[in-house]
Image (cartoon, grey):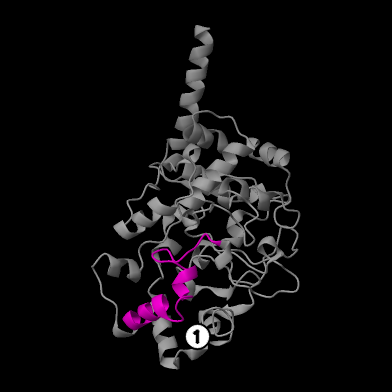
Amino acid sequence: MRKAAVITLISFLVLLFQFCADKDSAIPTTNGTSLSLPSNTLNYLVSYPTHVQNALTATDNTPANNQITNDGATLGRVLFYDTQLSANNTISCGSCHQQNKNFDDLIPLSKGFEGGLTDRKSMPLMNVRFYRNGRMFWDERSRTLEAQVLQPIQNHVEMGLTLAQLESKVKALDYYPALFLKAFGNTTIDSVKISRALSQFVRSIVTYQSKYDKVKQGTEAFSNAEAIGEQLFLNAGAPNTCASCHTPPMFITSDPARGFALQDINDAGINNQNRFKSPSLRNISTRTNLFHNGSIANLQAMLTSGAPGSGTGPIPLHAVAPQDIQNMLAFLNTLTDQTILTEEKFSNPFK
């Protein structure tokens, strides 16, 4: 018994040493890249500004049994960007949710591991922690993020694996035992832990360093146009204002009844009511191909082309003067957080 305990301890120390010995240690992979992680674990436990923290307290969908940890989110980051999690080792979660594109791919429909197209546009994976009801996908068919993160992996178009195949592939990769050990205290690898780690990483992707945030903290001020735009966003078309569906400070809602009744002959949305999830408007000015089908080119087009919310929808922006549309655009530009688009802890660790 004592000998077995010693062997277990030695194995534990070898795994930790192997993973932590060198700063930015590079571990070769089977697809010609190397996994490169810093020796000092990056920090995912952020102290958010008061206005963001208050929103998180009110709406956080993180389950009690899967709180974010630095080691858990680090494992999730590796899984998120690992193309080995697809049937032919070509596609990762990060292929359709690219950091420099707002964790989106900015195209109407995404390509899967064999080049097939998805049924809907990729939803930007920022601030998903703030969906109070926790339901995921455009039609909210997934009850939790933990359930959602495994579905693209199993989708026959997107990544093409069964859960058994996923577990087998991850177990065969020599860089994962040490990561699972640090995240969960043992080297057992299964789909539940994979789901939890991916969810920790995705929930950590939060925007809080935009001009809007600095204004709310009192360190910057809106321009005249931005200030007018904010008031229009909050009040134009009352009682059905922009803020009704995109509630500050995260500009998000968890109420599917608030989703636009967007007619699509090929897609009936939530409960077959032609309604779709309203994503956060943070970083909206740098996104393209908006809505579930990518049918609206960009923010300017959304506000001026008669799209839902632009005269034909619940918010009669056709009655808003052109200059005030520009003011609203100026305000929405302040929601852009450039830091998150390049921050190391959210970047691809495979080089």
Q: Could you tell me if residue 31 is visible in this image?
A: no
- Residue under the image location 70 percent in, 41 percent down: 163
Q: Left or right: 237 with respect to 91?
A: left
- Residue under the image location 46 percent in, 25 percent down: 13
Crowd tier of the residue under label 1, counting other residues whose Cα lies within 10 Å: few below 14, some 14–19, many 20 or above: many
Closest to the observer: 218 or 201?
Answer: 218
Where is residue 287 shown, x and y percent of the image?
52, 73
**Residue 323, picture quadrant:** bottom left
Residue type at the position of mark 1: Leu
Closest to the observer: 107 or 17?
Answer: 107
Q: Could you tell me if residue 37 is visible in this image?
A: yes
Q: Name the residue under label 1.
A: 317
Where is residue 134 shown, x and y percent of the image?
54, 52
Q: Left or right: 249 with respect to 182?
A: left
- Residue 177 position (above or below residue 154): above
Tell me which segment is drawn in magenta: 226-255
Q: Is residue 134 one of those drawn in magenta?
A: no
Closest to the observer: 203 or 140?
Answer: 140
Q: Left or right: 64 with respect to 161?
A: left
Q: Is residue 246 one of those drawn in magenta?
A: yes
SS label for mark 1? helix
**Residue 307, picture quadrant:** bottom right
- Residue 38 position (above or below residue 298): above
Where is residue 11 shown, x and y percent of the image?
51, 23
Q: Left or right: 157 with respect to 84?
A: right
- Residue 331 position (above or below residue 165): below
